[in-house]
Image (cartoon, helix red, strand yellow):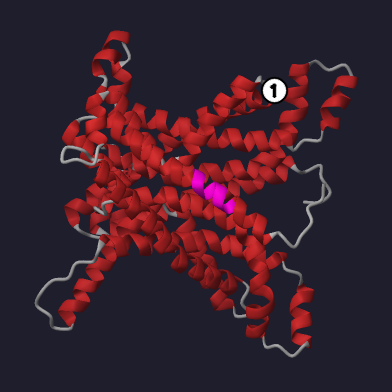
Amino acid sequence: MWCEWPGAFIGLEVLEKYGCRMASGFGLTMYLVAISFGLGLFIGLGLAVAKLRGGRISAALIHGYTTFFRGTPLLVQLFLIYYGLGSIRLFWQDVGLWWFFRDPTYCCLLAFTLNTAAYQAEIFRGALSSLPSGQAEAARALGMRPLPIFLKIEIPLAMIVALRPLGNELIVMIKASALASLVTLFDLMGATRFAFARSFDLSIYLVAALIYLCLVEIIRRLWDGMEHRLTRHLVLR
Amino acid sequence: MEKYLTLLSFGPEGWGLALLQGAWITISIALATVPFGLTLGLLVALGKRSRSYPIRLISTLYTTIFRGVPELLTLYVIYFGIQLLVQRLWKFLGFESSIEMSPFFAGMVALGVVLAAFSAEVWLGALNAIQKGQREAASSLGLTRFQAFRLVVFPQLMRVALPGLGNNWMVLLKETSLVSVITLQDTMFIATRANVVTKEPFLFFGVAAMIYLTFSMLSTWGFGKLEERANRGYVRAR
């Protein structure tokens, strides 16, 4: 198998033996992060708009949501969902959602999505409220409808401000996804813990650290490129 | 309802006292980490501005590594790594008995090392915000580089760095929940154990969430006060 090659190549026995587990763990980590961050993007944007444009009640509810999810550790939220919601089995069986809460992968996805959506909502709220009001007013004076104003004027402008914090949030999510290993999942961290428990070879942790580090570095480079593209019309970079 | 109150009471069947002790451990490890983490962070930030290339390289590598690796992984590596190292040293010195590192110390080192990496970026930003003229004025008064830093730059640094360090503190507070995996008996550890014994996950993880939320909100309030105090010499533009 190809996944045994890197270990064989650098002569690290433990990596050769558990290389395939590490590879599938890496896949699970990517899957968890991609889905939760992607969903969080839409939910976060929706919450930010609802908080800025909605009524007082929706603003208060969203404030409570973001305060809770940003004020408590992700680990607590994950356990609340995995153990807490998983404990009312009869209820979920009645409403036909037991398949969802039985599976630690879905519980992880739910916890990660709710958590990152709260952080992203604050990022988008900050970015949207930092826009000078003249931009939207000018667009309205040109006869644009509210939706195109939002999609074609406000979002691109807000993205310039929001891009960097969003990149940081993605990096935080990649690192936080290691918590999935605490609810029996074999993500990259879970596979590494498994390999260590079997081999007692600490170097497997260093390999995992290197993989995470590369991932974060790639995201950083990618984000620099995206920022460069979004601000290409600005003189001062 | 009464069942829940009994479970949270301070009596023999209640988990109230254990949870309070857990909350105490949470806040103590967070507070114990701060002096170590912030000092190391400031040193790393100064290292990044050093004239010597190797020191700059090491500082940059340090922040890149510890900001990019999951905290859980850092915690495991330090807990198991230092344990192995100390045990080897112990054997090397000729002692027969084995030695155990306390999870509190391991947790403090791991969280401190990560806090240092993140706070170094904050310190660096604050150092850059202090105008060059301040240092030049200090050196024209005959102060050495160290004196200029201690007497002129550092007192101003705190004010600029405070909001960023406040964020670092909030992240740290939440990260302390990870030390429960190396068996330190913090809030999270007690809640997990209470859940295993009583099968009431909602109650105990909910209480744990409330404990963390209380600490977070108190910190937000406290940092607001601190910032107000730090900025008392400055008029805010209205």
Q: Is residue B132 magenta?
A: no
SS class, disc 1: helix
Q: Residues within 10 Å of mark 1 (few under 14, many from 20)?
A: few
* The image quarter in which residue B184 lies: bottom left
Front-most of residues B163 and A219 = B163
* The image quarter in which residue A178 lies: top left
Q: Residue shown at 19%/67% (left/top)? A: B100
Residue B158: image location, x then y, percent? 62, 65
Residue B67's place in the image compared with A21, above or below, is below
B83 horizontally vs B115: left or right: left
Q: Which residue is the site of mark 1?
A: A53
Residue A88's place in the image compared with B6, above or below, is above
The disc labelled 1 sits on which kind of residue? Arg
Front-most of residues A196 and B105 = B105
Q: Quadrant of the N terminus of chain A?
A: top left
Toward the right, the furthest residue is: A141
Magenta span of residues: B217-223
Residue A201: image location, x then y, percent? 23, 60
Residue B215 visible from this viewpoint? yes
Residue A197's place in the image compared with A120, above or below, is below
B146 horizontally vs A212: left or right: right
Front-most of residues B104 and B65 = B104
Residue A19 visible from this viewpoint? no
Dominant secondary structure of the magenta stretch?
helix
Q: Residue shown at 17%/51% (left/top)? A: A198
Q: In which chain is the residue bearing label 1? A: A
* The image quarter in which residue A91 lies: top left
Residue A3's place in the image compared with A91, above or below, is below
Q: Residue shown at 50%/50% (left/top)? A: B170
Q: Residue shown at 17%/70% (left/top)? A: B99
Residue B145: image location, x then y, percent? 66, 84
Q: Is residue B220 magenta?
A: yes
